[in-house]
Image (spheres, rainbow, N blue to C red):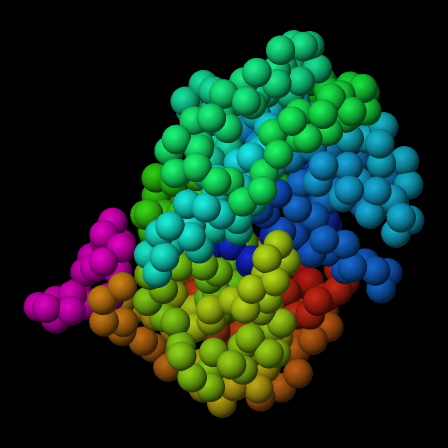
Amino acid sequence: MSTIVLGVQWGDEGKGKLCDILSSEVQICARATGGRNCGHTVVTAGISYDFHMLPSGLLHPTTTNLIGPGVVLHVPTFFSELANIEGKGVKNAQPRLKVSTRCALNLDLHAAADRLREGQLGKKNIGTTGKGIGPAYSSKAERSTVVLADLLDDEEFGDRIRAMERDYKLRYGGDLAGYDVEAEIKELENFREKLRPFAIDDIEFIEEAQQQGKKILIEGAQSALLDNTYGTWPFVTSTSTTFGGVMAGLNLDYRKVESVIGVLKAYCTRVGSGPFPTEDFGDVCNKLQEIGHEFGVTTGRRRRCGWLDLVSAKYSQHVNHYDVLNLTKLDILDTFEEIRVAVAYEHPDTGNEITSFPASAKLLSRVKVVYKTMKGWNTKTTGTKSFDALPKEAQEYIIFIEDFLGVKIKWIGCGPKREDILVRSI
């Protein structure tokens, strides 16, 4: 049976911690979409691990990990991240790590094109991570890229990279900021035999696992509001980050999906450009940033912060149909006298309530937000082990979220450590 963990809003909700916990209960932990633009931080036994390319299930010695065919693979990051976690004491990682031969490569060429394009957009840039994820997926859709199977078995794979370089130079006006196509091709050739032991036929692997009744955990990338179709277009990522994207990025039997878990932060954050209706530009933002350590794992950028937006969260629920939720970083709100929650949007011109989540980024950036104000609890919740032990006001906050979204909250994050997540009977 499969369990899928997805982000509810704009990412950085803390999916990594829940995936880390659940990985100890499964035989396979897999990624289905995204690339090295993702970032999960897991803290265990006082050691912090940052995952960008690899599944976080590698921290558990009996869990096999798969990078699925919907992921774009940056080969140098794959090996540097593997060396990093091994250097921190992760045992037997290499035999437990598999990569689909269908993965398209995320090249340094893509990153050079990404940065050039963002620079040309100026103030209207998307705010990408600069890792080349958009160009990697674009070249996959254009059928011009290289997949892992090409690198392993086609001696002429370099010709495709050279052709892409010529195309980017024509498209973006020449210079690719010092990018050296021959150096990248040579580097990939040197990685070829090192990669071969990890490469597998993912279809055969997943199908066999499902027939044997193995438990599979799918570690979602980014979140619903960054989805290429359902997100705040065009300020989105370049792939599908929703339930549908997982089904396209791994050959899962939909009849064997046991649970879809949404991970929702107790307040909202966003990295990069794009509409953010509840964004705060004053003391609330500063306080959330500092207490919540809201800096991107991948980019180091300071995250934009604001109150929890239940309008966008409900829209996300309608897209992904979560069975249950994990509410994270509740403890960050411990010192707030009052806590506000967005419960409706009003049209900026008519004042009428907008009954659906706007597809227009322009309109979404102009909506008037209707808030419900709730009393804070002014009590330390870090390390709380049961729902009943939480302050009454914190319990009320959680129940209000559940009632609004129509989904129960099973896991509640009350601190940065693995053990700081309480499990609630629902």
Return the residue nearer the eye: 108 or 255.
108
Is residue 319 depicted above or below 373 in this figure?
above
Q: Is residue 2 visible?
A: no
Quarter of the figure with the C terminus: bottom right
> Is residue 108 rendered magenta in the image?
no
Which span is picked out in magenta?
Answer: 345-364
Q: Can residue 122 be seen in this view?
A: yes
Return the residue nearer the eye: 50 or 354.
50
Is residue 272 depicted above or below 308 in this figure?
above
Is residue 384 depicted above or below 3 in this figure?
below
Residue 421 is left or right of residue 169, and the answer is: right
Residue at image position (58%, 69%) is: 294
Residue 323 is left or right of residue 184, and the answer is: left
Residue at image position (66%, 83%) is: 380
User: Residue 335: x percent and y percent?
Assistant: 57, 86
Is residue 141 depicted above or below 277 in this figure?
above
Total count of labels: 0
Residue at image position (63%, 58%) is: 297
Quarter of the figure with the N terminus: top right
Return the residue nearer the eye: 398 or 216.
216
User: Residue 340: x percent and y percent?
Assistant: 40, 78
Q: In which quarter of the image is residue 353?
A: bottom left
**Which secondary structure class fits the magenta region best?**
loop
User: Residue 230: x percent and y percent?
Assistant: 34, 43
